[in-house]
Image (tube, coloured by chain):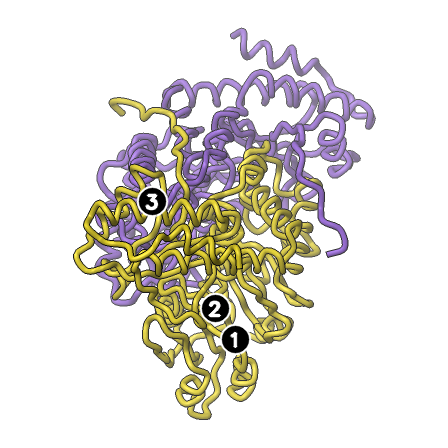
Chain colours: A purple, B yellow
Amino acid sequence: MEQLPAPLRAHARTLLGPGPSDVDPSVLRAISLPTVGHLDPAFLQTMDEIRSMLECLLGARGGRTTALSATGSAGMEACVVNLVERGDRVLIGQSGVFGGRMAEVARRAGAEVTLVEAEWGRPLELEALRRAAAGRQFRFIGLVHGETSTGVLQPLAGLRELADECGALLLVDAVTSLAGHPLDVHASGIDALYSGTQKCLSCPPGLSPVHFSDRAIARIGSRASAVQSWYLDINLIEAYWGGPRAYHHTAPINMLFGLHEALRLVLSEGLEPRFARHELNAHALWSGLEALGLELRVAEEHRLNPLTTVSIPDGIDDAAVRGRLLSEFGIEIGGGLGPMKGNTWRIGLMGSGSSRRNVHLVLSALATVLADMGHRAPENPIAAAASVYDA
Amino acid sequence: MEQLPAPLRAHARTLLGPGPSDVDPSVLRAISLPTVGHLDPAFLQTMDEIRSMLECLLGARGGRTTALSATGSAGMEACVVNLVERGDRVLIGQSGVFGGRMAEVARRAGAEVTLVEAEWGRPLELEALRRAAAGRQFRFIGLVHGETSTGVLQPLAGLRELADECGALLLVDAVTSLAGHPLDVHASGIDALYSGTQKCLSCPPGLSPVHFSDRAIARIGSRASAVQSWYLDINLIEAYWGGPRAYHHTAPINMLFGLHEALRLVLSEGLEPRFARHELNAHALWSGLEALGLELRVAEEHRLNPLTTVSIPDGIDDAAVRGRLLSEFGIEIGGGLGPMKGNTWRIGLMGSGSSRRNVHLVLSALATVLADMGHRAPENPIAAAASVYDA
């Protein structure tokens, strides 16, 4: 080529969008440890420890818990293609981009999809799902626990019972909720769950923690056809992660070093304190945003703590605001997806990024940029946030 | 959990197996740069530069070149599932594990596979492929350029013409050959190619460079059915890597930082000097191994330079030797796969690991361990290697 690109340099960013989130320096240090072989005894121990820590984080009892060698979207595909065979009927709830994506993945796997839609910004109602099921049997019922496109937290209560009524497995997307909201696969009767590393785990993107219950594994064992994806076949993956250590593919060693450290940080903090921290900072952010005269898109009882959606005021240019936040303050927030594109911002307080420091940072920067654009804030956002912290 | 695992520590290893290979410190440093957003202007530039450098490395003219967010095995699956639809006929050459894997992936994608087998340790003959084709048409002809299980380099000459006779696209696995052997997708008429980062690119595992020719892209554009994998659908991936920057999945930012630096190192060295270095060190290794009285598994004219297969002498315990190399010398070499398990070692000199230093290291350590086990070396392996360097 004519001229070789320059070496990359570090960019000073505070990542307060829908993910990736800021990564703890100790995780970056772990990622940069010298690579070892994927069958090295030291690495096999690392994998065992990752599995144990993930099981602890998920509340898993039995089943198979692992981290797939691809991003959270591949985790979604892995759950779907292991559970369904061509012609199977599935019931999927859609209240944003990611439920719709799950339906598309299922269709491509040959499933017949019954889609239940909720308004964007609202969770799915259990009764709406039951009505759509109409007494039929399904291979799985699939929902998104934390909708990253809308900022809605989907309640999981009652879903296990509904799944039992439908002879269905229960599949849950926990990409944005894992390690930011309480989640217990055993207590909620979840059969298949996937997540990503780049949200509340505060690890770079590239891996997908997944869990299959014993019930799901039994179902996969009784398939009549091979899983359509060789790469995502959980039984082949388990032969490497589990007992025989049979070669399947070469694991992404350094990314797994990072996940090991990220999980250590999560469990060192403790799950209850971590969830409480996410809740406190989210409430402070909400209070500050409302003080700025901004409208939150989701009713308080349905809000995700790690990700808040905000309406963009009339007359304010979405791209201009996000551009100034990035260029002048080094802050990334997210734009909207789908019908929320151009009218919604997504502000993430995820993992180590959920801090009072970042609440102050984003509120003060947003206040400054909006004021420049003629938007008048009714109250002082920092004072409003402080009232939450002081309560 | 009862006790939190300790933080990971660095292990002193020299990775001389079939991959992962040793990673340059500057690549590890790039991987540990602070994460940025996947739509950050700085990151979009990084992606553009990666694409340009990959095109240069591959000799690509047109088509689509990218790095998939998963390992080389997913690259194989991506090439297969984008090219075939259910019921398509494909012709696949198998002379080791990876050709067989390609056939399995194709069967799972609904293809009807005609398999042409060669003896392990031998390349496929063009005429054998032509006979197997028997004048029929195929969706693609697939082969492995560098068989990591056997250490054979598959000649590519004549394959384009054969593919044309069969109305077929030409699919090539370049996992172990890319950046270690000359390879030019344009000159060889390759329509789809995949590789991995953890071999001669000397980057940690986790990404898969792939290339599709304009002809392959046109074929994909005329599919009657959707690609079965949403995650690996090259048109969706291109919408992010190419013009519209449409969100598909969150790219593995830090891994891509590493690939950027690894590609810079490859192109800084220059392709011809790099290939010559791999060839020189391979010849020195071969000479040293023969001086040790070991038999190489592949005839010299068919050997891969980055990966050498060696017969384990009668009476020598495979696992004991590899265990001592690892524990006493920090050297990893690989065992055999399939019919070569237990009777073959695989020694890699890949990327930055292809050096005189490593040739000396592995020969002297192997000589020491084998002598302890009663194997008598007819000649001095270091002197034999030196005669190659001095020639």
x, y (%) of residue B124?
A: 41, 78
Residue B46 seen by the camera:
yes
Q: Residues within 10 Å of mark 1 (few under 14, many from 20)?
A: some
The numbered mark, 1 or 3, whose residue comes first in the sequence reads: 1
**Residue at x 27% of width, y 34% of height:** A187
Question: For the residues marked 1 and 2, what is the alpha-carbon distance in whole angstroms?
Answer: 7 Å
**Residue at x 36% of width, y 46% of height:** B364
Q: Residue furthest bottom?
A: B135
Question: For the residues marked 1 and 3, what is the alpha-carbon distance in whole angstroms?
Answer: 36 Å
Please check whether the numbered discs 1 and 2 fall on a single chain: yes
- In the rendered view, does B179 fall on the left or right side of A225? right
Check the image and report above or below for A122 versus B385: above
x, y (%) of residue B357?
A: 47, 45
Secondary element type, mark 1 = loop
Are the residues at dot 1 and dot 2 in contact (C-beta closer than 8 Å)?
A: yes
x, y (%) of residue B194?
A: 51, 62
- Where does label 2 land, which residue? B145
Check the image and report above or below for B239 versus A315: below
Secondary element type, mark 3 = helix
The numbered mark, 1 or 2, whose residue comes first in the sequence reads: 2
Pick the quarter of the image with the N terminus of chain B: top left
Are the residues at dot 1 and dot 3 in contact (C-beta closer than 8 Å)?
A: no
Q: Chain of mark 2?
A: B
- Where does label 3 land, which residue? B365
What's the residue type where badge 3 is placed? Ala
- Where does label 1 land, which residue? B156
Q: Chain of mark 3?
A: B
What's the residue type where badge 1 is placed? Leu
**Residue at x 49% of width, y 62% of height:** B78
